[in-house]
């Protein structure tokens, strides 16, 4: 039987969440079980080094290089690893391509699974009860809340990340982006367009 | 049969409120701290990802609903540290000792973080469970959705997709089975598939006749049709 303890140990820590974290960090540090400088490094990694700019590079490259795109759709894990994007919460990556006929959108209804090496730490809305509950049942209404309207010809495929596979949406290359180089293309790729709740920017 | 985290399809949560893409990664300083403490504690090697997910899922429904995201993380972590014997109840209440801990040799040290995060922890394993389904084949999910090894245990078949007809979209290889791995019963790897379900198979009022939901499901969650 799983241990369903009605007096959960966490209740012994201060109720205020910031103080609760601080208290646990202090206890673990005193016992030599965590190194606070290592914590700073973890925060720095996800605040400054690993984020949606990684995924944008992958998408821009796929837009500009059809051989790369085919390889990406066939085996994204090894292709993005070759670009240096691998690691925690990105050990098994699948890229799904939007077309005029099919729009893809990613959710994790059970928790908050997300392709960290490509997109970083998920935004608050991705982890919210409203998104987790509704994305699978009424994706079009949810998309409308992001300002995205799909045509009636387009079907929606919602990917519920229930295992260790992490999904990245390859959005359609926007009109007017012909002739742009990889860096300019990457600047059009939004985080939400790679989750499937947004579209890439259109070049001005 | 259910736990409160299994909320796919639920009514009543109201609109999604997207924040700007330029919003900070951690809305509060303690959010980043909570994430970092949780990751660093994981490197002590006393549990796996399925155990830690289950610890959050076992928060009482009342706590799960009222806690913000990182409160769930930190509270699930505190419970797990006690359950695994890393900390005592006295430690949490401030009456513990600062004696050197036997696990201190495993501490995630400054300077090793980026390497440790980059290494990851793949979930695919060799398996001798024969592959039962091929791409395109029709399957049905087990009903009710539940851990068949441990009553009330961890599972990754959401309740909204139990007893539903779908078709195999792709085979992901053979992966660690969370239903076993979350409970110290071994990794028990088996085939994992992406399975597509018509929205009309899952919902009374689907938005569009062509819409689908795809879930990653282990072979033991599926039956042939």
Image (tube, rainbow, N blue to C red):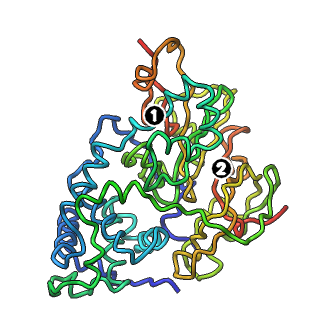
- Quadrant of res B56: bottom left
Where A187 falls versus B127 (above or below)? above
Q: Position of residue B133 (x, y in %)?
A: 80, 59
Mark 2 vs mark 1, CA separation in Å: 21 Å
- Quadrant of res A23: bottom left
Residue at the image point whose x is 45% and y is 44% from the top: A85
Q: Position of residue A5 (x, y in %)?
A: 40, 84
Instruction: Kindly check if marks 2 and 1 are in contact, taking CB atoms under 8 A apart as contact.
Output: no
- Quadrant of res B225: bottom right
Where A96 falls versus A164 (above or below)? above
Residue at the image point whose x is 45% and y is 17% from the top: A181
Q: In this view, does A22 lie to the left or right of B193?
A: left
Local SS, label 1: loop
Q: Position of residue A105 (x, y in %)?
A: 56, 41
Residue at the image point whose x is 18% and y is 64% from the top: A36
Q: In this view, does B55 lie to the left or right of A29?
A: right
Return the residue at label 1.
A146
Q: Give the letter of the chain under mark 2.
A: B
**For mark 2, does the 10 Å Cα neighbourhood hold few (<14), some (14 to 19), or many (20 or more) residues?**
many
Q: Nearer the viewer, residue B174 or B54?
A: B174
> Is residue A135 in view from this perspective?
no
Q: Which of A162 and B68 is in front in this view?
A: A162
Residue at the image point whose x is 46% and y is 39% from the top: A83
**For mark 1, does the 10 Å Cα neighbourhood hold few (<14), some (14 to 19), or many (20 or more) residues?**
some
Tag in front: 2 or 1: 2
Q: Position of residue A199 (x, y in %)?
A: 49, 28
Local SS, label 2: strand
Return the mark for residue B177: none
Return the residue at label 2.
B214
């Amino acid at each position: 039987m799983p241990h369903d303890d009605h007096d959960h140990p966490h209740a012994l820590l201060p109720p205020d969440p910031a103080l609760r974290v601080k208290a646990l960090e202090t206890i673990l540090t005193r016992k030599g079980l965590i190194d606070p400088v290592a914590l700073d490094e973890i925060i720095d990694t996800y605040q400054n080094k690993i984020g949606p700019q990684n995924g944008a590079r992958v998408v821009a490259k796929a837009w500009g290089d059809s051989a790369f795109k085919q390889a990406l759709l066939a085996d994204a894990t090894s292709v993005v690893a070759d670009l240096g994007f691998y690691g925690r919460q990105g050990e098994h990556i699948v890229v799904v391509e939007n077309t005029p006929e099919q729009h893809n959108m990613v959710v994790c209804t059970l928790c908050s699974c997300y392709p960290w090496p490509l997109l970083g730490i998920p935004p608050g809305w991705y982890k919210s009860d409203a998104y987790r509950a509704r994305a699978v049942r009424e994706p079009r209404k949810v998309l409308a809340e992001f300002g995205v309207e799909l045509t009636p010809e387009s079907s929606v495929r919602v990917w519920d990340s229930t295992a260790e596979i992490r999904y990245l949406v390859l959005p359609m290359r926007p009109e007017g982006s012909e002739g742009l180089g990889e860096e300019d293309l990457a600047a059009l790729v939004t985080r939400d367009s790679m989750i499937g709740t947004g579209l890439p920017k259109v070049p001005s | 049969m259910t736990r409160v985290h299994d909320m796919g399809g639920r009514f009543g949560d109201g609109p999604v409120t997207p924040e700007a893409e330029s919003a900070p990664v951690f809305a509060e300083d303690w959010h980043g701290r909570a994430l970092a403490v949780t990751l660093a504690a994981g490197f002590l090697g006393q549990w796996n990802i399925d155990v830690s997910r289950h610890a959050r899922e076992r928060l009482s429904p009342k706590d799960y609903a009222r806690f913000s995201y990182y409160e769930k993380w930190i509270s699930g972590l505190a419970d797990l540290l006690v359950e695994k014997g890393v900390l005592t109840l006295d430690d949490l209440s401030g009456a513990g000792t600062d004696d050197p801990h036997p696990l201190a040799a495993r501490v995630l040290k400054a300077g090793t973080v980026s390497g440790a995060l980059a290494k990851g922890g793949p979930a695919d394993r060799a398996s001798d469970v024969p592959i039962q389904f091929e791409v395109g084949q029709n399957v049905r999910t087990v009903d009710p959705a539940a851990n068949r090894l441990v009553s009330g245990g961890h599972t990754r078949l959401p309740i909204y997709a139990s007893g539903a007809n779908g078709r195999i979209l792709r085979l992901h290889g053979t992966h660690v089975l969370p239903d076993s791995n979350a409970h110290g019963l071994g990794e028990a790897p088996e085939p994992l598939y992406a399975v597509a379900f018509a929205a009309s198979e899952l919902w009374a009022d689907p938005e569009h006749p062509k819409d689908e939901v795809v879930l990653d499901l282990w072979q033991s969650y599926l039956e042939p049709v």
